[in-house]
Amino acid sequence: MTETTSGIARIAAAFARAKDAGRGALIAYLCAGDPDRATSAALLGAMGSEGADIVEIGIPYGDPLADGPTIAAAAQRALNGGMTFNAALELAARAAASGAPPILMFTYYNPVLQYGVERFAGDLAARGICGAIVPDVPLEETGALRAAFAASGLALPLLVAPTTPPARARAIAAASEGFVYIVSRLGVTSAATEPDFAWITDRVAGLRAATQLPLAVGFGISRAAHVRRAYEVADGAIVGSALIDSYAGAIGSAAVDRARAFLRGLQAS
């Protein structure tokens, strides 16, 4: 895979386009198969037109350690609807082929191990997917994943948490590809708890000297004010639970309309 077509390059280009537009990159999270397959596909199709620069597609999993109630419930709905690991990859592949923004899968390490690390990397690249976020794999155990992703030109953003010591945070940043995912506060994903922007500002300042990668803030980003603040202190904002909450209980075009309105509202000045 050439540098110009690699997933890493496409993620870098998305951040660069946002920067050229005078803002940070908006990264939107959706769960594959929620609330159903057809609606999930339609939601993915709407992301780019409403300003999402990058899309995370969650592969539903029964033991989502980093996910709060909204995303955990979305994953369970998807699993109940028959969504599988392979079907999630196919859903992402169709979205990528249809001109969606750069796509990253979001999954946990056990399903990847069961699927096969090298097979996973090869299938992502073959499907036009830019990489993956695997939040539960410790830095010391990322070697096989990093090697397989590097061979396929894939992005592998790693997470820095509030409890991560500064030296370890710098090591995580150095091992990341695509961007560094800064977890805004302790706990799981949720739109109900405010991000800790004082901590984020300090952590971003410490990481700027350790990496040239973009820094994106996630967990608890739920309102336009949060997005603006994330853009001020970092290079991107990641929105998941609040986006899923925005179309709760709706399917089809009604869900898409609600998601569109929510994304427009996030970027209101």
Image (spheres, rainbow, N blue to C red):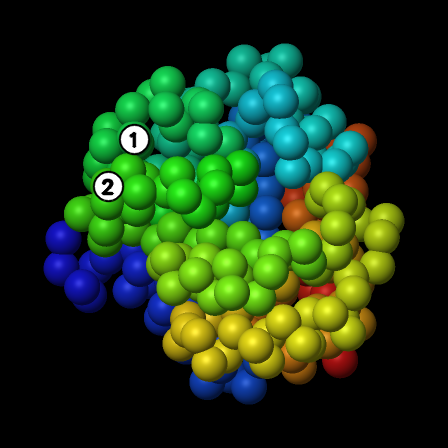
Residue at 38% of width from left, 51% of height from top?
Answer: 156
Q: Is residue 194 above or below residue 214?
A: above
Answer with the quarter of the image where residue 90 lies.
Answer: top left
Counting every numbered tag in the picture gives: 2
Q: Quadrant of the C terminus?
A: bottom right
Q: Which mark is residue 148?
A: 2
The answer to whether the residue labelled 1 contacts the one labelled 2, judged by CB atoms less than 8 Å apart, is: yes
Asked if residue 88 lies left or right of residue 218, the reply is left
Label 1 to label 2: alpha-carbon separation: 7 Å
Percent of width and height locating residue 196: 78, 65
In the image, 50 versus 119, the foreground residue is 119
* Residue that appears at 44% across and 47% down: 139
Q: Indicate the amino acid at tag 1.
A: Val
Element carrying mark 1: helix
The answer to which image quadrant residue 166 occupies is bottom right
**Taking the image as drawn, is residue 259 in sight?**
no
Q: Amino acid at mark 2?
A: Ala
Q: Nearer the viewer, residue 226 or 185?
A: 185
Q: For residue 117, which numbered disc appears in the image? A: 1
